[in-house]
Each structure stands twice: as C-alpha cells, then as structure tokens.
Image (cartoon, rainbow, N blue to C red):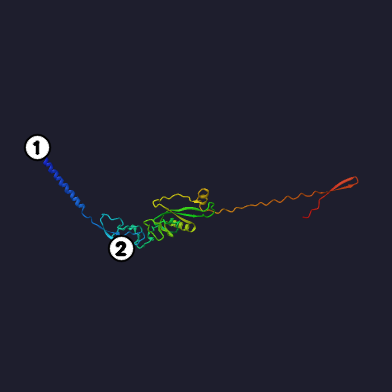
Amino acid sequence: MNRRLMTVLGFAFLVALGATFLLYGLIASRVRGSNQPVANQQLIVAVRDLQRGELIKDADLKTVAWGSSESPKGSSADRNLLVGRGVISEIVAGEPIIDSRLAPKDSGAGLAPAIPIGKRAVALRVNDVVGVSGYVLPGSRVDVLITGNAPGQNPQGPEIRTILQNVEVLSAGTNIQRDAEGKPIQVPVITVLVTPEDAETLSLASNETRIQLVLRNPLDDQKGESKGTAVGRLFKGGPAPEDKGPRRPAAPRTVVVKAPEPPPPPPPPPPIVVELLKGPTRSSQNFEPAPVAP
C-alpha cells in the first residue's frame, strides 16, 4: 500500500514540475518580447518656450526620437513646414510643435495671426481707471460699460449701461503675452477681440460716450442681466430707466389765449317829452335826443 502511494506521489510531482517549467518558459518569452525596443519615430519639438506672437526660427526647433507608438495629432517631422510661422498659442520647451498652435504659412507674426477668422481686434484708449489700475492683461476677460446722455430728453440724468460682456483682451499696449507674475502694467491702449458687429458698437461708444472696463474671472462665462442705472435713481431711488428705443423730442404745445370780451354798449338816452298847453287843452310830444359826437 505504501509502495503504491509513493508511486502516485512521485508521478504527481513530475507532472507539477513539468507544468512549472512550461509556465516559466511562457512568461519569460513574454517578458523578453516586451523589453525589445520599439521602433522610434522622429518629431520636431521646441527648444525653448515659445510665446504667443513669436515667429519660429530654425534655432527654436530640434528633432528628437519619439518613443510612443502614436505621435500627437498635428505634429510634424519636417522643419520646412514649421520655420517662419507665427505662434498663436504658447508652446513650452520640449513640447511637439502642433499645427493648430501655429498661424498659417506666410501670415507673419505678431498680433494679426492670433485673430481668429470672423473676429476683429479693436483698440481702446484707457487710463488708470478704465484699465482697472493696470490689471487688464493679455488673456483677461472684461465687460465694457458706457456712461453718457441718451438722445432726447432724459429727466434722470446721465445713464450707465453694460454693452458687451466676457470680452477677451488680446494685448495691453505692445505686450501680447501675459505677465507670469500678474503684475499691473500701465498702458495707454488695450486691444480686445470682438465680432464685427461689436466692433462697430465699440467704435461708436468710444467716440460718443465714456468707456469703463470691468475685470471679471476668466472662468466665469455667464452673461448677467442688467438694465443699467441713472443719476436720478442714485439720489431718488426711482426705477431703472427702461429701454424704449430712441427718444423723440416732445411735440410743441399750442397755447390759446382768449381775448377779453368788449363791454356792452351803453343804453340809449331817454326821449325828450315836451308838453303843450292851449287853454284848457294839454298835450305832449316826444323828441329823440341829438347823437353825441365821439
């Protein structure tokens, strides 16, 4: 009995040992296959940080071996397709150059290539108050307010209204890059990105009214509802002015003055009565008085 048991145990041990060697060989082959180097592809990356508006030069690029199986969409390995193009979105050092972050070929550098198709850049003259004490920087988001007197009669005085909201600032003066430390920059002109219709509105507002910029959180893209206010409401607490379209001047009023009635004519004088006596006979006779010359 013991002999048969030893035979079964020995056979089981041999089977387990064979299965162990087989499994080890399979795992080892998988590990050796995964350690084999993947065929690298060449990509163009930035040598240094490239700011918005810069023109890419050959010295700003270098070719590296990209070990990933898939290259980033829009990347390139041809320097001729990248040199001489403007940067419209910041690129950090070592990052592959993506076509969507560059301006079209031969469009130049600076601010113009950064303007999206269908948009317009409008310059606004500012001071410390309008420019929010210098904290309106490239990339900021602002609201545009105007102050002035509406055409026609305005009993409540000058009004203030918000005409544009969530407007992107393209440049502050000649700077088109945001300051890394967020320091205030005093500049005389700020350029904003708007639609063609809003560009007309801003151009008219800058000539006919006084403009004020209101800085807002760049993550806040909600447009608030505001009816504006007027001087009369500040002092009297009256209702906000309603937008009833262009005001028309009041029509002139006609005042009728009634002349006094002439006095009635005086009554005619009484007739003159003459009595005649002939003996016992008595008679009378009436005579009209002579008219009085005026």
Q: Secondary structure at mark 1?
A: helix
How far across and how far down the image is residue 178, in percent?
38, 57
Looking at the image, which is closer to me, 20 or 81?
Answer: 20
Q: How many marks?
A: 2
Query: Which residue is found at the position 9% from the left and 37% from the top?
Result: 2
How far across and how far down the image is residue 153, in percent?
54, 53
Q: Which residue is mark 1?
A: 2
**Furthest-right residue in view?**
279
Q: Is residue 1 left or right of residue 234?
A: left
How far across and how far down the image is residue 160, in percent?
49, 53
Looking at the image, which is closer to me, 137 or 194?
Answer: 137
Residue kind at label 2, given as amino acid type: Ala
Residue kind at label 1, given as amino acid type: Asn
Q: Is 271 above or below relative to 90?
A: above
Q: Is residue 255 left or right of residue 243?
A: right
Q: Which residue is mark 2?
A: 59
Q: Is 107 above or below relative to 20?
A: below
Q: CA distance from mark 1 to mark 2?
A: 84 Å
How far across and how far down the image is residue 229, in percent?
49, 51
Looking at the image, which is closer to me, 71 or 239?
Answer: 239
Q: Which quadrant of the figure contains the C terminus?
A: bottom right
**Furthest-top residue in view?**
1
For the residues labelled 1 and 2, say whether their Cβ atoms are less than 8 Å apart. no
Q: Earlier in the sequence, mark 1 or mark 2?
A: 1
Crowd around label 1: few <14 · some 14–19 · many ≥20 (10 Å):
few
Crowd around label 2: few <14 · some 14–19 · many ≥20 (10 Å):
few
Query: Which residue is found at the position 15% from the left and 45% from the top?
Result: 20
Q: Which quadrant of the figure contains the N terminus?
A: top left
Q: Secondary structure at mark 2?
A: helix
Q: Is residue 103 left or right of residue 154?
A: left
Return the mark for residue 68: none
